Amino acid sequence: LNVEVDYGAKLREQKQADMLDCLADRFTKPNRVWAQYIELLDMTRDAPIPLEIHQQVLRRCTPSFQAVRTSFARSLPKSLTESRPHPYEHRFLTIFSAIKRAGERADLDDYEFILEQFAAVGHHIGCARLLREIASRRLEPRTRTYGLCLRAIAYKLSLPHRGTDLEIERLKDECSRLCLFVMDMIRKRVAEGRKKAKGKEKLREGEDVEAAGRVGVPS
């Protein structure tokens, strides 16, 4: 009996199992999680990876936002008027790219996890990009979503601003425009919520009238 063995498939299965074992250990360091994930991506290439693995790696490939803020505060950049990317932003982008290539969609919790990380270092530019992506993907932002963006702005503005007057004014302008963008999204959300509530109210009124007509009750 001549049976062909797909060694590539078996190796991919083993790499995925290794990844799950790595994630199952709550003591695994972020760098180790990331190294295992990169190996899995390299091995699987176009083969599908379950969305849950991407989402778990997203949350485990970086230290907590508290630890990230502490590290950031200890090594403040020379010019705080410039937007410095989050130290693990490239990891987040790699994971999101892998999710998109697989034909899957990140959910709002995934976006909010990154927003919380960005807020920890005042990465307001990154928050603005994510908020626009959330809107473009027709996801429904929550109060927490907006709050994290505003938290990033507040922390950025609370930092000592070393730079030229022009740089400081540019930073304030960026933060002001982002605040206006967030507030505009909140207003639209409130308006849409009211519109939906009115629609449901009219629908209930119509159903009540119809029910009353069926039992012969004058409307």
Image (cartoon, rainbow, N blue to C red):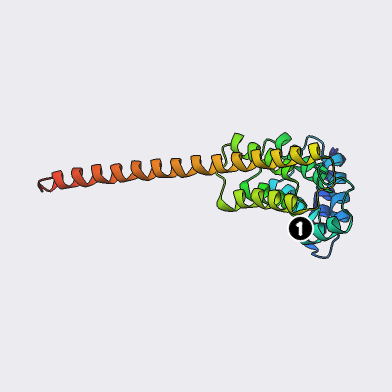
Q: Residue 28: percent from the left, percent from the top?
A: 84, 61
| Quadrant (top left/top right/bottom left/bottom right) for the N terminus | top right
Q: Nearer the viewer, residue 89 or 39?
A: 89
Which residue is under mark 1? 65
Residue shown at 60% from the left, 53% from the top:
144
Q: In which quarter of the image is residue 207?
A: top left
Residue shown at 72% from the left, 52% from the top:
119
Residue shown at 34% from the left, 43% from the top:
198
In the picture, measured across the screen, residue 215 lies left or right of residue 53, that is: left
The secondary element bearing badge 1 is classed as helix
Tell me, yes or no, if residue 84 can be seen here: yes
Q: Which of 177 and 36 is in front in this view?
A: 177
Q: Nearer the viewer, residue 165 or 27?
A: 165
Vertical placement of 207 versus 73: above or below? above
Q: Nearer the viewer, residue 7 or 17?
A: 17
Q: Residue 111: percent from the left, percent from the top?
A: 67, 46
Q: How many labels does the image show?
A: 1
| Quadrant (top left/top right/bottom left/bottom right) for the C terminus | top left
Vertical placement of 151 versus 98: above or below? below
Q: Residue 163: percent from the left, percent from the top?
A: 85, 43
In the picture, measured across the screen, residue 135 lies left or right of residue 42, that is: left
Q: In which quarter of the image is residue 140?
A: top right
Local packing at callout 1 (Cα closer than 10 Å; few below 14, some 14-19, many 20+) is some
Residue shown at 84% from the left, 40% from the top:
164
Tell me, yes or no, if residue 5 can be seen here: no
Q: Residue 26: percent from the left, percent from the top?
A: 79, 64
Q: Which amino acid does label 1 sit on?
A: Phe
Going by the picture, which residue comes out furthest to the bottom?
27
